[in-house]
Amino acid sequence: MKVVQVLPRLHGGGVERGTIEIAAYLKHLGHEAVVISEGGPLVKELSTLGVTHVQLSVGTKSLQALRGLWQLRKFLIETRPDIVHSRSRLPGWLCFLAMKLLPNSVRTRFVTSVHGLHSVSWYSAIITKGERIEAVSNAAQSYLLDNYQGFDHSRVRVIPRGVDPLEFSTKFEPQRTWNEEWLTWCRERQISGAPIVSIVGRISRLKGHHDFLSVIELLHQQDLPAIGLIIGGESEGHTVLHQELQERVEKSAILRSSVYFLGQRTDVRELMTISNFVVSFSSTPEAFGRTVLESLTLGVPVVGYDHGGVGDLLKTLYPVGAVPVGNVQVAADRIKELHAQQHPIESHEMTLQAMREKTVAMYEELLC
């Protein structure tokens, strides 16, 4: 079986991570795995895994996309994959149109994914065009079924994202050298004993970084002098937001002494482990909430807005962590309460292996 996954770019993020995980598993099973994108730092990881990466114009919403359409058509004719799996809307349209331009003799099977709860429009409707439609959570499936008509609902497969229990568990401890470096970092900044609250993810308008800063300020005003870690680099096109956040921190005496921008990191798991809380303040509902699941699996409490996939995860695994959307006062109050009195985190079976097996089974359905 030859499977081609297509996404805009290979920067950090849940979609990118899932793409790599499936490609690696296909390779492990002896199948041929190919990833098409406009490139990015994670291409190196694919190469290490022995997975082929092909750089085409599939992620930029401009006339370059027309070039990508013909590049895709040429690629599909030359390589004849069994499955093309689009993981984003623009690549979805390009794949869909490229396949329409193929001779029937080389037509391939088409899979789409619901990774985000996007605005309902003709553009987003490409997610309904797959012969199989992967919904990454029950929230994603509900969004799909509630907002789009005229497609066969039996084509939808709910395949929750999963974590590797060998990498994420309450037993995980950072290596001694990492701990030593972290303690040195803390000493240099005179950080000692303060609770650490982290927000994980690329800096973008949707991720709630301004709400995060407000919560850190409120915690200090309530005599809980928390340290705030912003873990993640800026998303493409969000340089202005990054500058806004930095300026806000510089102008506030509280934030200036307590908030740190850590940028894109390869030790996110370790940073989540040493955090007392991880927060999820996305202004719009997310389809899943991978870092929420990872944090809870590590045994780290999460306080997040109660909507979308994040709300579903919290209701299932850590109900006390769910707070009303946009209410930073309640979020700060909840962190303070939970810091004073811990609540148990429920166990789960959302594993990486389960996600991999269900995804491959979905591909095999189409080829039977």
Image (cartoon, helix red, strand yellow):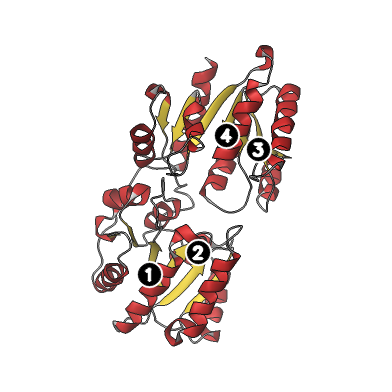
- Specify which label sits upstream in the sequence, 2 or 3: 3
The residue singled out by tag 4 in the image is 92
- Looking at the rendered structure, the kind of residue marked 1 is Asn
Judged from this view, the residue extending furthest toward the top is 105
Estimate how packed mark 4 is, as few (under 14), some (14 to 19) or many (20 or more) residues with alpha carbons within 10 Å: many
- Looking at the rendered structure, the kind of residue marked 3 is Val
- Specify which label sits upstream in the sequence, 4 or 3: 3
Instruction: Reply above or below: 1 against 295.
Output: above
The residue singled out by tag 2 in the image is 270
Look at the numbered discs 4 and 3 and tell me whether their residues touch, using CB distance below 8 Å: no
Point 28% across, 48% down: residue = 316
User: Tag 2's secondary structure?
Assistant: helix
The residue singled out by tag 1 in the image is 276
> Where in the figure is residue 368, as x and y percent of width and height?
52, 14
The residue singled out by tag 3 in the image is 35
- Looking at the rendered structure, the kind of residue marked 2 is Glu
Point 24% across, 71% down: residue = 337
